[in-house]
Protein backbone atom coordinates (compact mmCIF):
# COMPACT_ATOMS: atom_id res chain seq x y z
CA UNK A 1 0.00 0.00 0.00
CA UNK A 2 1.19 3.53 -0.79
CA UNK A 3 1.48 5.37 2.53
CA UNK A 4 2.77 8.83 3.42
CA UNK A 5 6.26 8.63 4.89
CA UNK A 6 5.28 9.84 8.36
CA UNK A 7 1.98 8.01 8.63
CA UNK A 8 1.56 5.77 11.67
CA UNK A 9 -0.37 2.50 11.70
CA UNK A 10 -3.30 3.99 13.58
CA UNK A 11 -3.80 6.71 10.98
CA UNK A 12 -3.68 4.39 7.97
CA UNK A 13 -6.99 2.74 8.71
CA UNK A 14 -9.14 5.41 7.02
CA UNK A 15 -7.16 4.83 3.83
CA UNK A 16 -7.84 1.11 3.66
CA UNK A 17 -10.23 -0.52 1.25
CA UNK A 18 -13.94 0.06 1.65
CA UNK A 19 -16.35 -2.85 1.22
CA UNK A 20 -17.54 -1.85 -2.27
CA UNK A 21 -14.07 -2.09 -3.77
CA UNK A 22 -13.43 1.65 -4.11
CA UNK A 23 -11.11 3.97 -2.27
CA UNK A 24 -12.05 5.86 0.84
CA UNK A 25 -11.39 9.15 -0.91
CA UNK A 26 -12.69 10.50 -4.22
CA UNK A 27 -9.22 11.20 -5.58
CA UNK A 28 -7.61 9.36 -8.48
CA UNK A 29 -4.22 8.45 -7.01
CA UNK A 30 -0.97 7.39 -8.56
CA UNK A 31 -0.49 3.72 -9.45
CA UNK A 32 2.60 3.55 -7.29
CA UNK A 33 2.79 -0.19 -6.63
CA UNK A 34 1.67 -3.66 -7.71
CA UNK A 35 -2.10 -3.77 -8.36
CA UNK A 36 -2.57 -0.07 -7.72
CA UNK A 37 -3.08 2.23 -4.73
CA UNK A 38 -4.78 -0.34 -2.51
CA UNK A 39 -3.02 -3.42 -3.96
CA UNK A 40 -6.41 -4.81 -5.03
CA UNK A 41 -6.52 -3.94 -8.74
CA UNK A 42 -9.11 -1.17 -8.30
CA UNK A 43 -8.52 2.56 -8.67
CA UNK A 44 -10.95 5.43 -8.00
CA UNK A 45 -10.75 7.13 -11.38
CA UNK A 46 -13.84 8.75 -12.89
CA UNK A 47 -12.24 10.45 -15.89
CA UNK A 48 -11.55 7.33 -17.96
CA UNK A 49 -13.35 5.98 -21.01
CA UNK A 50 -16.75 4.42 -20.44
CA UNK A 51 -17.26 3.30 -24.04
CA UNK A 52 -15.01 2.18 -26.84
CA UNK A 53 -13.77 5.09 -29.00
CA UNK A 54 -14.92 5.03 -32.62
CA UNK A 55 -11.38 5.24 -33.95
CA UNK A 56 -9.93 2.78 -31.44
CA UNK A 57 -7.46 3.45 -28.67
CA UNK A 58 -4.57 5.84 -29.25
CA UNK A 59 -1.02 4.97 -28.24
CA UNK A 60 0.67 7.99 -26.64
CA UNK A 61 4.17 6.50 -26.81
CA UNK A 62 6.26 3.34 -26.93
CA UNK A 63 9.64 2.95 -25.22
CA UNK A 64 12.21 0.22 -25.69
CA UNK A 65 12.35 -2.22 -22.78
CA UNK A 66 13.37 -5.80 -22.15
CA UNK A 67 12.32 -9.24 -20.93
CA UNK A 68 10.61 -9.42 -17.56
CA UNK A 69 7.33 -9.80 -15.69
CA UNK A 70 7.44 -6.63 -13.62
CA UNK A 71 4.45 -4.33 -14.10
CA UNK A 72 4.79 -0.52 -14.28
CA UNK A 73 4.60 1.66 -11.17
CA UNK A 74 3.63 5.26 -11.95
CA UNK A 75 3.87 8.30 -9.66
CA UNK A 76 4.92 11.95 -9.92
CA UNK A 77 5.42 11.80 -13.67
CA UNK A 78 7.65 8.71 -13.61
CA UNK A 79 6.87 5.23 -14.95
CA UNK A 80 9.19 2.69 -13.31
CA UNK A 81 9.68 -1.00 -14.14
CA UNK A 82 12.34 -3.75 -14.35
CA UNK A 83 13.77 -6.02 -17.05
CA UNK A 84 16.77 -8.01 -18.18
CA UNK A 85 19.27 -6.04 -20.25
CA UNK A 86 22.91 -6.20 -21.33
CA UNK A 87 23.64 -4.64 -17.90
CA UNK A 88 21.74 -7.37 -16.05
CA UNK A 89 18.48 -6.82 -14.18
CA UNK A 90 17.86 -3.10 -14.33
CA UNK A 91 15.38 -0.71 -12.78
CA UNK A 92 14.40 1.99 -15.26
CA UNK A 93 12.42 5.20 -14.82
CA UNK A 94 10.70 6.68 -17.88
CA UNK A 95 9.08 10.06 -18.31
CA UNK A 96 5.36 9.25 -18.04
CA UNK A 97 4.53 11.98 -20.58
CA UNK A 98 6.73 10.89 -23.48
CA UNK A 99 8.52 7.66 -22.54
CA UNK A 100 12.01 9.14 -22.53
CA UNK A 101 14.50 7.45 -20.22
CA UNK A 102 15.14 9.38 -17.00
CA UNK A 103 17.59 6.90 -15.48
CA UNK A 104 18.57 3.23 -15.52
CA UNK A 105 20.24 1.42 -12.60
CA UNK A 106 21.62 -2.15 -12.71
CA UNK A 107 20.66 -4.22 -9.66
CA UNK A 108 21.82 -7.80 -10.29
CA UNK A 109 22.88 -10.18 -13.07
CA UNK A 110 20.22 -11.08 -15.65
CA UNK A 111 17.71 -13.53 -14.22
CA UNK A 112 17.10 -16.77 -16.14
CA UNK A 113 14.38 -19.30 -15.35
CA UNK A 114 12.67 -22.13 -17.23
CA UNK A 115 9.30 -20.50 -16.51
CA UNK A 116 10.38 -17.23 -18.14
CA UNK A 117 13.33 -14.89 -17.85
CA UNK A 118 13.60 -11.51 -16.17
CA UNK A 119 12.59 -10.05 -12.80
CA UNK A 120 9.09 -10.87 -11.56
CA UNK A 121 8.25 -8.26 -8.91
CA UNK A 122 6.82 -4.80 -9.53
CA UNK A 123 8.65 -1.81 -7.98
CA UNK A 124 7.00 0.21 -5.22
CA UNK A 125 7.31 4.01 -5.25
CA UNK A 126 7.03 5.55 -1.79
CA UNK A 127 7.78 9.24 -1.35
CA UNK A 128 11.36 9.97 -2.51
CA UNK A 129 12.24 6.28 -2.78
CA UNK A 130 11.54 3.28 -4.99
CA UNK A 131 11.93 -0.30 -3.78
CA UNK A 132 12.74 -3.12 -6.20
CA UNK A 133 13.12 -6.90 -5.75
CA UNK A 134 15.10 -9.03 -8.20
CA UNK A 135 14.40 -12.55 -9.39
CA UNK A 136 16.96 -14.16 -7.09
CA UNK A 137 15.99 -12.07 -4.05
CA UNK A 138 18.01 -8.84 -3.93
CA UNK A 139 15.99 -6.00 -2.40
CA UNK A 140 17.09 -2.46 -3.27
CA UNK A 141 16.11 1.04 -2.18
CA UNK A 142 16.84 3.82 -4.67
CA UNK A 143 16.30 7.55 -4.98
CA UNK A 144 13.32 7.74 -7.34
CA UNK A 145 14.47 11.08 -8.79
CA UNK A 146 18.00 10.03 -9.71
CA UNK A 147 18.16 6.22 -9.59
CA UNK A 148 20.98 6.37 -7.04
CA UNK A 149 21.19 3.29 -4.82
CA UNK A 150 20.60 4.01 -1.13
CA UNK A 151 20.99 0.40 -0.02
CA UNK A 152 20.80 -3.12 -1.42
CA UNK A 153 20.54 -6.43 0.39
CA UNK A 154 20.36 -10.04 -0.72
CA UNK A 155 17.44 -10.87 1.53
CA UNK A 156 17.45 -14.53 0.55
CA UNK A 157 21.11 -14.85 1.63
CA UNK A 158 20.50 -12.77 4.76
CA UNK A 159 17.80 -15.22 5.86
CA UNK A 160 19.90 -18.31 4.95
CA UNK A 161 17.22 -19.40 2.51
CA UNK A 162 17.02 -20.22 -1.17
CA UNK A 163 15.00 -18.59 -3.96
CA UNK A 164 11.62 -19.99 -4.92
CA UNK A 165 11.81 -22.43 -7.85
CA UNK A 166 10.21 -20.00 -10.32
CA UNK A 167 11.87 -16.87 -8.98
CA UNK A 168 11.12 -14.32 -6.28
CA UNK A 169 7.85 -12.65 -7.26
CA UNK A 170 6.93 -10.65 -4.16
CA UNK A 171 6.35 -6.98 -4.95
CA UNK A 172 7.60 -4.91 -1.98
CA UNK A 173 4.93 -3.76 0.47
CA UNK A 174 5.66 -0.52 2.33
CA UNK A 175 4.03 -0.18 5.75
CA UNK A 176 5.06 2.84 7.79
CA UNK A 177 8.86 2.53 8.27
CA UNK A 178 9.05 -1.06 6.97
CA UNK A 179 9.38 -2.70 3.56
CA UNK A 180 8.04 -6.27 3.49
CA UNK A 181 8.68 -9.12 1.02
CA UNK A 182 8.58 -12.90 0.96
CA UNK A 183 11.97 -14.53 1.12
CA UNK A 184 12.47 -18.19 0.24
CA UNK A 185 12.61 -21.63 1.70
CA UNK A 186 15.27 -23.24 3.88
CA UNK A 187 18.64 -24.26 2.52
CA UNK A 188 19.16 -28.06 2.58
CA UNK A 189 22.16 -27.68 4.90
CA UNK A 190 20.12 -25.75 7.49
CA UNK A 191 17.82 -27.86 9.72
CA UNK A 192 15.56 -24.91 10.59
CA UNK A 193 12.38 -24.64 8.47
CA UNK A 194 13.17 -21.11 7.28
CA UNK A 195 11.08 -17.95 7.40
CA UNK A 196 8.96 -16.95 4.44
CA UNK A 197 8.15 -13.29 5.22
CA UNK A 198 10.62 -10.59 6.26
CA UNK A 199 10.33 -6.89 7.15
CA UNK A 200 13.28 -4.56 6.68
CA UNK A 201 13.90 -1.05 7.88
CA UNK A 202 13.19 1.33 4.99
CA UNK A 203 16.08 3.58 5.88
CA UNK A 204 18.95 1.07 5.92
CA UNK A 205 17.69 -2.41 4.99
CA UNK A 206 18.22 -3.91 8.46
CA UNK A 207 15.97 -6.89 9.23
CA UNK A 208 13.30 -5.87 11.75
CA UNK A 209 11.29 -9.10 11.92
CA UNK A 210 10.59 -12.37 10.14
CA UNK A 211 7.52 -14.60 10.19
CA UNK A 212 5.87 -17.76 8.79
CA UNK A 213 7.82 -20.99 8.35
CA UNK A 214 8.24 -22.70 4.99
CA UNK A 215 8.34 -21.82 1.30
CA UNK A 216 7.18 -18.36 0.20
CA UNK A 217 4.96 -19.13 -2.78
CA UNK A 218 4.69 -16.34 -5.38
CA UNK A 219 2.12 -13.97 -3.92
CA UNK A 220 2.74 -10.39 -2.81
CA UNK A 221 1.70 -9.49 0.75
CA UNK A 222 -1.08 -6.97 1.31
CA UNK A 223 -2.11 -4.67 4.15
CA UNK A 224 -5.76 -5.38 5.00
CA UNK A 225 -8.13 -3.97 7.60
CA UNK A 226 -9.63 -6.92 9.47
CA UNK A 227 -11.97 -6.39 12.38
CA UNK A 228 -10.75 -2.80 12.65
CA UNK A 229 -7.06 -3.74 12.86
CA UNK A 230 -4.38 -3.56 10.13
CA UNK A 231 -2.88 -6.95 9.23
CA UNK A 232 -0.09 -7.80 6.82
CA UNK A 233 -1.69 -10.75 5.04
CA UNK A 234 0.81 -13.09 3.38
CA UNK A 235 -0.23 -15.93 1.06
CA UNK A 236 2.78 -18.25 1.23
CA UNK A 237 3.40 -21.80 0.09
CA UNK A 238 1.64 -23.32 3.10
CA UNK A 239 -1.40 -21.02 3.28
CA UNK A 240 -2.46 -17.54 4.33
CA UNK A 241 -1.31 -15.80 7.53
CA UNK A 242 -2.22 -12.56 9.24
CA UNK A 243 0.79 -10.78 10.73
CA UNK A 244 0.97 -7.79 13.08
CA UNK A 245 2.87 -5.13 11.12
CA UNK A 246 4.74 -3.62 14.05
CA UNK A 247 6.59 -6.72 15.27
CA UNK A 248 5.81 -9.66 12.94
CA UNK A 249 3.66 -11.59 15.40
CA UNK A 250 1.57 -14.22 13.60
CA UNK A 251 -2.04 -13.52 14.59
CA UNK A 252 -3.88 -16.20 12.62
CA UNK A 253 -3.40 -18.64 9.78
CA UNK A 254 -5.36 -20.86 7.41
CA UNK A 255 -3.77 -23.82 5.58
CA UNK A 256 -4.06 -23.71 1.78
CA UNK A 257 -1.35 -25.87 0.24
CA UNK A 258 -1.22 -25.78 -3.57
CA UNK A 259 0.94 -28.06 -5.76
CA UNK A 260 4.39 -26.59 -6.55
CA UNK A 261 3.79 -23.90 -3.89
CA UNK A 262 1.85 -21.98 -6.55
CA UNK A 263 -0.07 -19.63 -4.29
CA UNK A 264 0.42 -16.58 -6.47
CA UNK A 265 -2.62 -14.27 -6.37
CA UNK A 266 -2.65 -11.48 -3.77
CA UNK A 267 -5.16 -11.75 -0.87
CA UNK A 268 -7.90 -9.10 -1.05
CA UNK A 269 -10.36 -7.75 1.50
CA UNK A 270 -14.09 -8.29 0.95
CA UNK A 271 -16.27 -6.47 3.49
CA UNK A 272 -13.78 -7.23 6.26
CA UNK A 273 -13.19 -10.79 5.08
CA UNK A 274 -10.26 -12.28 3.14
CA UNK A 275 -10.49 -13.88 -0.29
CA UNK A 276 -7.73 -16.18 -1.54
CA UNK A 277 -7.51 -18.26 -4.69
CA UNK A 278 -4.98 -20.51 -6.43
CA UNK A 279 -4.63 -22.39 -9.68
CA UNK A 280 -3.46 -26.00 -10.24
CA UNK A 281 -7.17 -26.92 -9.82
CA UNK A 282 -7.05 -25.85 -6.18
CA UNK A 283 -9.78 -23.20 -5.96
CA UNK A 284 -10.78 -20.43 -3.60
CA UNK A 285 -12.13 -19.64 -0.15
CA UNK A 286 -13.69 -16.67 1.63
CA UNK A 287 -12.48 -16.33 5.22
CA UNK A 288 -13.92 -14.42 8.16
CA UNK A 289 -11.27 -13.31 10.65
CA UNK A 290 -12.65 -12.35 14.06
CA UNK A 291 -10.86 -11.11 17.16
CA UNK A 292 -11.86 -12.91 20.36
CA UNK A 293 -10.10 -11.35 23.32
CA UNK A 294 -6.38 -11.56 22.59
CA UNK A 295 -6.78 -14.21 19.89
CA UNK A 296 -8.22 -14.45 16.40
CA UNK A 297 -10.47 -17.10 14.93
CA UNK A 298 -10.67 -17.95 11.22
CA UNK A 299 -13.88 -19.37 9.73
CA UNK A 300 -14.83 -20.33 6.19
CA UNK A 301 -17.73 -18.22 4.93
CA UNK A 302 -17.72 -20.39 1.83
CA UNK A 303 -15.20 -22.54 0.00
CA UNK A 304 -14.98 -23.83 -3.56
CA UNK A 305 -12.04 -26.16 -4.11
CA UNK A 306 -10.86 -28.96 -6.43
CA UNK A 307 -11.61 -29.42 -10.15
CA UNK A 308 -15.12 -27.96 -9.90
CA UNK A 309 -14.08 -24.74 -8.20
CA UNK A 310 -15.73 -21.51 -9.33
CA UNK A 311 -12.45 -19.53 -9.31
CA UNK A 312 -8.88 -20.81 -9.71
CA UNK A 313 -6.61 -17.77 -10.04
CA UNK A 314 -3.37 -19.09 -11.53
CA UNK A 315 -1.26 -15.91 -11.28
CA UNK A 316 -3.97 -13.29 -11.53
CA UNK A 317 -5.69 -11.52 -8.64
CA UNK A 318 -9.47 -11.15 -8.86
CA UNK A 319 -11.04 -7.72 -8.33
CA UNK A 320 -14.06 -6.82 -6.20
CA UNK A 321 -16.71 -4.44 -7.51
CA UNK A 322 -20.10 -3.85 -5.88
CA UNK A 323 -20.20 -7.21 -4.16
CA UNK A 324 -18.98 -9.31 -7.08
CA UNK A 325 -15.59 -10.83 -7.81
CA UNK A 326 -14.32 -10.77 -11.39
CA UNK A 327 -11.37 -12.98 -12.25
CA UNK A 328 -9.70 -15.67 -14.34
CA UNK A 329 -10.66 -19.28 -13.62
CA UNK A 330 -7.82 -21.46 -14.91
CA UNK A 331 -8.73 -25.07 -15.67
CA UNK A 332 -6.27 -27.87 -14.97
CA UNK A 333 -2.60 -27.76 -14.03
CA UNK A 334 -1.41 -24.59 -15.80
CA UNK A 335 -3.63 -25.68 -18.70
CA UNK A 336 -4.63 -23.59 -21.72
CA UNK A 337 -8.33 -23.32 -20.84
CA UNK A 338 -9.21 -20.15 -18.92
CA UNK A 339 -12.67 -18.73 -18.26
CA UNK A 340 -13.36 -15.10 -17.36
CA UNK A 341 -15.75 -15.44 -14.44
CA UNK A 342 -17.97 -13.30 -12.22
CA UNK A 343 -19.05 -14.69 -8.84
CA UNK A 344 -21.16 -13.38 -5.99
CA UNK A 345 -18.65 -12.56 -3.24
CA UNK A 346 -21.20 -13.26 -0.50
CA UNK A 347 -22.05 -16.80 -1.61
CA UNK A 348 -19.46 -17.94 -4.17
CA UNK A 349 -22.20 -18.60 -6.73
CA UNK A 350 -21.32 -18.02 -10.39
CA UNK A 351 -23.10 -15.01 -11.89
CA UNK A 352 -21.68 -15.59 -15.38
CA UNK A 353 -18.76 -17.23 -17.11
CA UNK A 354 -17.20 -16.26 -20.45
CA UNK A 355 -15.87 -19.68 -21.36
CA UNK A 356 -12.47 -20.05 -23.00
CA UNK A 357 -11.76 -16.33 -22.78
CA UNK A 358 -8.05 -17.11 -22.65
CA UNK A 359 -5.26 -16.23 -20.26
CA UNK A 360 -4.88 -12.65 -19.19
CA UNK A 361 -5.03 -10.24 -16.29
CA UNK A 362 -7.37 -7.45 -15.23
CA UNK A 363 -7.80 -4.31 -13.18
CA UNK A 364 -10.81 -2.02 -12.75
CA UNK A 365 -11.78 1.63 -12.68
CA UNK A 366 -15.21 3.29 -12.56
CA UNK A 367 -17.13 0.10 -13.30
CA UNK A 368 -14.94 -0.97 -16.23
CA UNK A 369 -12.66 -4.01 -16.36
CA UNK A 370 -9.42 -3.31 -18.23
CA UNK A 371 -8.08 -6.66 -19.38
CA UNK A 372 -4.65 -7.42 -20.82
CA UNK A 373 -4.52 -10.73 -22.69
CA UNK A 374 -1.44 -12.85 -23.21
CA UNK A 375 -2.07 -12.60 -26.95
CA UNK A 376 -1.59 -8.80 -26.84
CA UNK A 377 -5.10 -7.31 -26.65
CA UNK A 378 -6.36 -4.57 -24.38
CA UNK A 379 -10.02 -5.33 -23.70
CA UNK A 380 -12.74 -3.18 -22.13
CA UNK A 381 -15.52 -5.09 -20.35
CA UNK A 382 -18.42 -3.59 -18.43
CA UNK A 383 -18.38 -4.82 -14.83
CA UNK A 384 -21.94 -6.11 -14.94
CA UNK A 385 -22.96 -9.10 -12.78
CA UNK A 386 -25.92 -9.84 -15.06
CA UNK A 387 -23.93 -10.77 -18.16
CA UNK A 388 -20.57 -10.55 -19.93
CA UNK A 389 -20.55 -7.24 -21.80
CA UNK A 390 -17.48 -6.54 -23.95
CA UNK A 391 -17.13 -2.90 -25.03
CA UNK A 392 -14.15 -3.34 -27.35
CA UNK A 393 -10.68 -4.77 -27.84
CA UNK A 394 -7.52 -3.90 -29.72
CA UNK A 395 -4.21 -5.67 -30.41
CA UNK A 396 -1.57 -3.23 -29.09
CA UNK A 397 1.27 -5.07 -27.35
CA UNK A 398 3.08 -8.39 -27.29
CA UNK A 399 2.79 -11.30 -24.87
CA UNK A 400 2.45 -10.16 -21.27
CA UNK A 401 1.27 -11.57 -17.95
CA UNK A 402 0.96 -8.21 -16.22
CA UNK A 403 -1.92 -5.84 -15.60
CA UNK A 404 -2.29 -2.37 -17.00
CA UNK A 405 -1.45 0.48 -14.61
CA UNK A 406 -4.26 3.06 -14.77
CA UNK A 407 -3.29 6.62 -13.90
CA UNK A 408 -2.81 10.07 -15.45
CA UNK A 409 -5.51 9.25 -18.02
CA UNK A 410 -3.43 6.41 -19.45
CA UNK A 411 -2.93 2.66 -19.29
CA UNK A 412 0.74 1.80 -18.89
CA UNK A 413 1.52 -1.73 -20.12
CA UNK A 414 4.77 -3.57 -20.73
CA UNK A 415 5.62 -6.69 -22.68
CA UNK A 416 8.98 -8.35 -23.30
CA UNK A 417 10.30 -5.62 -25.58
CA UNK A 418 8.48 -2.35 -24.88
CA UNK A 419 6.66 -0.17 -22.39
CA UNK A 420 3.48 1.23 -23.93
CA UNK A 421 1.38 4.20 -22.80
CA UNK A 422 -2.22 4.15 -24.11
CA UNK A 423 -4.62 7.07 -23.81
CA UNK A 424 -7.82 6.10 -22.00
CA UNK A 425 -9.03 9.44 -20.64
CA UNK A 426 -12.62 10.35 -21.49
CA UNK A 427 -12.90 13.35 -23.82
Image (tube, rainbow, N blue to C red):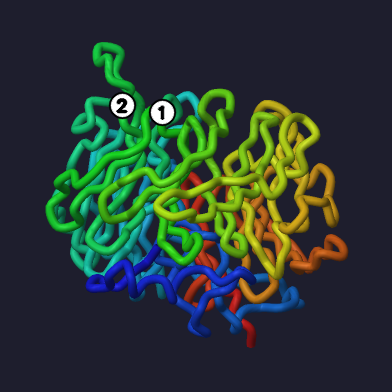
The front one of 93 and 25 is 25
Q: Are marks 1 and 2 in contact (CB under 8 Å)?
A: yes
Pointer 2 residue: 194
Q: Is residue 242 left or right of residue 254?
A: left
Q: Residue 377: image x %, image y %?
A: 67, 55
Question: Where is residue 109 shown, x and y percent of the image?
Answer: 26, 34
Image position, residue 215 (x, y; %): 41, 28
- Looking at the image, residue 401 sits to the left or right of residue 187; the answer is right
Residue plotted at (24% across, 70% down)? 5
Residue at figure coordinates x 28%, y 26% from the top left = 161
Q: Which residue is mark 1?
A: 215
Secondary structure state at the residue bearing disc 1:
loop
Depth check: give the residue in front, 373 or 185: 185
In the image, 297: left or right of 54? left
Image point 71% across, 38% down: which residue? 330
Q: CA distance from mark 1 to mark 2?
A: 8 Å
Residue situated furthest top in the rendering? 189
For disc 1, the neighbor class at 10 Å (few under 14, some 14 to 19, many from 20) is many
Amino acid sequence: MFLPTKTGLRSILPLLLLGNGTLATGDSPAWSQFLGPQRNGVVAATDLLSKWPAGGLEVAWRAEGGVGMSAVAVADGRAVTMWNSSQGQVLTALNAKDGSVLWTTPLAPSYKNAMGDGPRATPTIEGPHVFAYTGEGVLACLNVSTGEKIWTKSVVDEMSSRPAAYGMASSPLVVDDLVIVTVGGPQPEFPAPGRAVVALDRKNGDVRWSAVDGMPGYSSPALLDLDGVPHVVAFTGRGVTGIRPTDGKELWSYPFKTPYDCNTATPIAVDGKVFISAGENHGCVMLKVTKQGNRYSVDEVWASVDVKSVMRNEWQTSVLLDGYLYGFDNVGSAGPVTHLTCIDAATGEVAWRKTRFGKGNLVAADGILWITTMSGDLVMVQANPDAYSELGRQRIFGKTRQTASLTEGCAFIRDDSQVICIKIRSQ
